[in-house]
């Protein structure tokens, strides 16, 4: 059974609408073999609907309901996730009022972190700053 599930992590994490035709049967076989995996996958897909709720109140009710379902499964990882979501509920629910994400910021931070690792040999701090600005084809000029 373990060999049949092996290599399906990518399929489990992808949105179903982004799967290719030949990947769908592999995902279905993996879900049929493991009930906790099936429950986790369905709850993951259901949680995606949180962002489509029309109001903050409906988002709060949806989140509370989802956390209860996760707790009822008895699966440790889902219970831990529900606890984390409850802890961060105010920040999550702020999306209803201000529907923005930190996706771009996270991407920029990742680029900076990667450049920092690669720049170990840079002797000039100004050169490093120029490299940072060039990551995004910056229109800013260095003064000084």
Image (cartoon, helix red, strand yellow):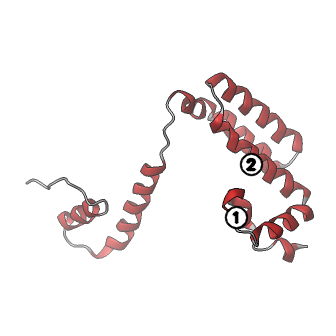
Q: Where is residue 81? Give x, y as percent.
A: 72, 45
Q: Which mark is residue 19?
A: 1
> Percent from the top left, x then y, of residue 5?
83, 71
Instruction: Identify the residue shown where x is 26% and y is 60%.
Output: 137
Residue 31 in which image quadrant: bottom right
Residue position marked by numbered label 2 in the rendering: 45
Does 65 sit left or right of 113 as displayed? Answer: right
Residue 88, percent from left and from top: 62, 35
Of circles 1 and 2, which is in front? 1
Between the residue at mark 1 and the residue at mark 2, the CA separation in whole angstroms equals: 14 Å
Place of residue 83 in the rendered image (x, y in percent of width and height, measured from the top left): 72, 38
As helix, strand or loop, the secondary structure at mark 1 comes to loop
Q: Where is 50 relative to 119, above or below?
A: above
Image-based side of 23 in relation to 73, left or right:
left
Going by the image, does 143 lie left or right of 111? left
Question: Quick check: 40 above or below 46?
Answer: below
- Please give the label number shown on residue 112: none
* SS at mark 2 in the image: helix
């Amino acid at each position: 059974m373990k060999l049949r599930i092996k290599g399906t992590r990518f399929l489990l994490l992808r949105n179903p609408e982004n799967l290719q035709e030949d990947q769908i049967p592999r995902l279905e076989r993996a879900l049929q073999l493991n009930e906790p995996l099936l429950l986790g996958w369905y709850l993951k897909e259901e949680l995606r609907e949180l962002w489509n709720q029309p109001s903050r109140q409906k988002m709060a009710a949806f989140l509370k309901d989802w956390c209860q379902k996760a707790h009822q499964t008895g699966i440790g990882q889902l219970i831990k996730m529900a606890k984390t979501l409850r802890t961060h509920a105010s920040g999550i629910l702020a999306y209803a009022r201000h529907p923005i994400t930190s996706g771009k910021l996270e991407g920029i931070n990742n680029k900076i972190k990667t450049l920092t690792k690669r720049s170990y040999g840079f002797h000039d701090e100004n050169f490093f700053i120029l490299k940072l600005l060039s990551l995004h084809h910056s229109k800013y000029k260095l003064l000084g």
